[in-house]
Amino acid sequence: MNPDRTGHPLKILLVDDDPAEHLLLKRTLEKVDGPPIELDYVGDIDSAVECVKAGDIDIVFLDNRLVPNNDFRETAPQLREAGYVGPIGIISSDISGSYFQQFPDFGVDFRIGKDEIDRTAISFIISEYTRDQLSDNCAEDFS
């Protein structure tokens, strides 16, 4: 989705069992230049599944560990099974575990440490994962 072309705000869903993370991300998003951003927050994977089934979510930021699940290897596939096709990013206090290298195998598009989340990183993620994937000058345009 390209929010600039649709006129709608970019909808980010934060899935984290720590409500303080919602406040921190909200403050960071307020400093990001670019399209308007709407942040939704849920504290568990079941609520996240319901949100993505309802539609209109452009990006999901998924905490690595959500009780009672072990980590993203259990939760991210649940979002994909619910039909969500947009980008999923894993956020974690520590992304050094070797299993983080397997993130694409579980339907995850990117990973980022919570200490790395700032306006520059968010701006990059938004730019990278919401831009149109087709060139403005497709070969079919010249036929």
Image: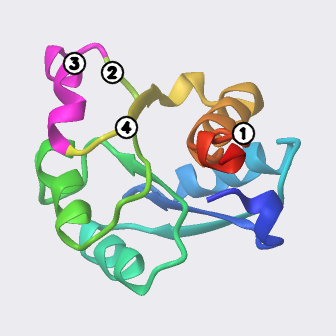
Q: Find out whether residue 42 is within the magenta segment.
A: no
Sequence-first tag of 3 and 1: 3
Label 3 – label 2 distance at C-alpha: 9 Å
Q: Secondary structure at mark 3?
A: helix
Q: Position of residue 49 (x, y in %)?
A: 29, 74
Look at mark 2 in the image and give the residue it sits on: 95
Sequence-first tag of 1 and 4: 4
Q: Which mark is residue 101?
A: 3
Sequence-first tag of 4 and 2: 2
Amino acid under label 2?
Ile
* Image side of residue 45 versus residue 32, left or right: left
Amino acid under label 4?
Asp
* Image side of residue 100 versus residue 109, left or right: left
* Image side of residue 91 versus residue 105, left or right: right
Q: Residue at x 12, y 60 (%)?
A: 68
**Observer-nearest of 28 and 120:** 120
Q: Secondary structure at mark 4?
A: loop
Label 1 – label 2 distance at C-alpha: 38 Å
Sequence-first tag of 3 and 4: 3
